[in-house]
Image (cartoon, rainbow, N blue to C red):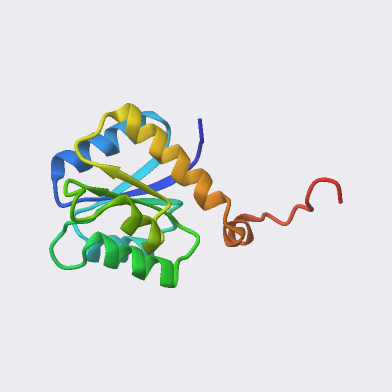
Amino acid sequence: MIKHLRVLVVDDDPTIVEVLSAFLDTKGYTVHSAANGQQALEAIEREEFDLVISDIEMAGINGFELLRQIRASYPRIGIILMTGYEEAHPLSAALRAGADGYISKPFSLRKFSLIFEQAYWNALSRDDWWEDHDDGKESAGS
């Protein structure tokens, strides 16, 4: 299990926010939530997050626009996009936009866990993530 992650859940459906927040909390993660893209951007300006889980279909700033703005200012944050409209927002579009993970609603918590961990490792595989999280230690073998 990955410990000490700071996660932001963004969805205009309070049930999704509640279920995902409760589930992630049981895993030991620090979880915050936002009801829309604007609230999410404000939260990201105030606090550091390792992962953002966002719905695509939201009024105002939708998930793709949120992803674009996060990538522009905070490229090291891992991002998972969720949608109940897979035909309108296919996996390929989410990945081309820069998402680290994608999941279609409805989903099981087991499937969500797999996508969550995969997105975290995708974010870790980006060189820029390590620049932000290097604590000054020399790399192994140096």
The part of the image, by quadrant, that contains residue 30 is top left
Residue 91 image offset from top left, x and y in percent: 32, 50
Which residue: 44% across, 57% down?
A: 48
Residue 35 image offset from top left, x and y in percent: 18, 54
In this picture, residue 47 sits left or right of residue 4: left
Which residue: 30% across, 43% down?
A: 103
Residue in front for this viewpoint, 110 or 93: 93
Residue in front for this viewpoint, 20 or 44: 20
In this picture, residue 79 sits left or right of residue 138: left
In this picture, residue 113 sits left or right of residue 126: left
Looking at the image, which residue sits at the far right?
142
In this picture, residue 75 sits left or right of residue 11: right
Count up the numbered dots.
0
Residue 92 image offset from top left, x and y in percent: 34, 54
Residue 95 image offset from top left, x and y in percent: 39, 56
Answer above or below: position of 29 versus 72.
above
The part of the image, by quadrant, that contains residue 129 is bottom right
The part of the image, by quadrant, that contains residue 107 is top left
Which residue: 26% across, 60% down?
A: 63
Answer above or below: position of 75 versus 108.
below
Which residue: 21% across, 38% down?
A: 18
